Image (cartoon, rainbow, N blue to C red):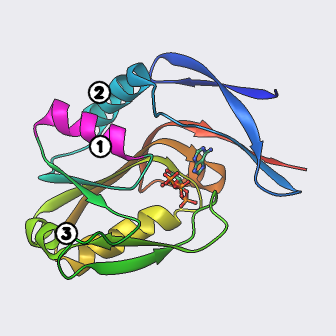
Amino acid sequence: METYKLHVAGLERDLPICPLNDNLSIAGFVMFGDVEMTIRSAEELLKRVGDFDLLITAESKGIPLAYEMSRQSGKKYILARKSIKLYMHDPVSVSVKSITTAQVQTLYLDSTDMEQIRGKRILIVDDVVSTGESMHALECLVEKSGGVIAGKCAVLAEGDARERTDVTFLGELPLFFK
Ligand SMILES: O=P(O)(O)OC[C@H]1O[C@H](OP(=O)(O)OP(=O)(O)O)[C@H](O)[C@@H]1O
Ligand SMILES: Nc1ncnc2[nH]cnc12
């Protein structure tokens, strides 16, 4: 298997190169199961971001990172879901098409989450920012809820996102074009 060597948060990992289509591959960065990477990334991001009241991330790969940043900072995290559950009240939705997913996905927040966000400084968190669609969808949900965006952060910026100055990130990933 072809791999890409990543150095981030003082750690080294060999990421598998995964084709997305005939012309484009990514180095797959999946923190699920990698507790050391999750803890170290959360520490490093928290050192770099400013004050905030609440974290928000999107289902699913952002969850362990948001959990760990919440644990370390003592601030709660809100999760934007990718499907509506029966226990969600009056969900609001935003569409999103990330680089890894063929079809358009939808992110949902329920009214309880929106009430918590209203008037608060919200830190947007994700594992990777690539096209920026997922982060943009989270921004829309925060704005719809009446929250103030305190900052945006990701462990890795991929492709064009490496040039972004509005997102705090710890490392970079290339895209692999044929
Ligand atoms: O900047 P973008 O192009 O939007 O890509 C980044 C998003 O893609 C991945 O999620 P994915 O859609 O693969 O969903 P998953 O976390 O549920 O696997 C990743 O966790 C980010 O949320
Ligand atoms: N390189 C990558 N690995 C995992 N998820 C991603 N989402 C966007 N880019 C990604």
Q: Is residue 23 left or right of residue 117?
A: right
What's drawn in magenta, residue-wise? 62-74
Secondary structure under the numbered disc 1 in the rendered image: helix
| Furthest residue toward front | 86
Q: Quadrant of residue 80?
A: bottom left
Crowd around label 1: few <14 · some 14–19 · many ≥20 (10 Å) = many
Q: Is mark 1 within 8 Å of ligand 1?
A: no
Is 80 situated above or below 41? below
Circles 2 and 3: CB distance less than 8 Å?
Answer: no
For label 3, the crowd category at 10 Å Cα-Cα, with few meaning under 14, some 14 to 19 and many 20 or more, is few
Q: CA distance from mark 2 to mark 1?
A: 11 Å
Q: Quadrant of residue 5?
A: top right
Mark 2 residue type = Glu
Disc 1: which residue: 66
Residue that carries the numbered disc 3 in the rendered image: 87
Q: Position of residue 115 (x, y in %)?
A: 9, 72
The residue pinned by badge 2 equals 43
Give the mark nearer the N terminus: 1 vs 3: 1
User: Type of residue at label 3?
Assistant: Tyr
Looking at the rendered structure, the kind of residue marked 1 is Ala
Residue 63 is inside the magenta segment: yes
From the image, state whether disc 2 or disc 1 is nearer to you.
1
The question of residue 21 being in magenta is answered with no
